[in-house]
Amino acid sequence: MPYVNGKYYTEREIQEIKSKLDEDQFDKFLISGVIGFATGSALIGGLLGGDLIGGFLGDTLEGTDDSWF
């Protein structure tokens, strides 16, 4: 049984934590992409959404480069 930060975890608990982290990362990616698309800025999309790659992808899909950022 793994021991992390003073607590023992079962394998099931570890799998639940990992799946939660994966879902959170994907949500950040999507939110960043939408913000990057809406603002036309990868930087703003990454900072507000939490994932710079998602912001970059949203900015790329937007098409024009008319943002000041």
Image: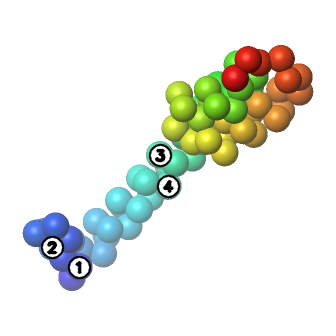
Does residue 27 appear anywhere in the picture? yes
Q: Amino acid at mark 4?
A: Asp
Q: Is residue 28 above or below residue 12?
A: above
Residue situated furthest bottom in the rendering:
1
Return the residue at label 2: 8
Circles 4 and 1: CB atoms closer than 8 Å: no
Q: CA distance from mark 2 to mark 4?
A: 22 Å
Left or right: residue 64 versus residue 30 is right
- Residue 49 versus residue 2: which sits nearer the camera? 49
Return the residue at label 3: 24
Q: How is the image coloured?
A: rainbow
**In the rendered view of the protein, which quadrant contains the N terminus?**
bottom left
Circles 2 and 1: CB atoms closer than 8 Å: yes
Q: Which residue appears at 57% of the width and 42% of the height?
A: 51
| Comes first in the chain, label 2 or label 4 | 2
Q: Amino acid at mark 3?
A: Asp
Mark number for residue 45? none
Q: Position of residue 9 (x, y in %)?
A: 21, 71
Q: Residues within 10 Å of mark 2 (few under 14, many from 20)?
A: few
Q: Amino acid at mark 1?
A: Pro
Q: Amino acid at mark 2?
A: Tyr
Q: CA distance from mark 2 to mark 1?
A: 6 Å
**Element type at marker 3?**
helix
| Comes first in the chain, label 4 or label 1 | 1
Does residue 34 appear anywhere in the picture? no
Q: Which residue appears at 44% of the width and 58% of the height?
A: 19
| Comes first in the chain, label 1 or label 3 | 1
Return the residue at label 4: 22
Q: CA distance from mark 1 to mark 3?
A: 23 Å
Q: Residues within 10 Å of mark 1 (few under 14, many from 20)?
A: few
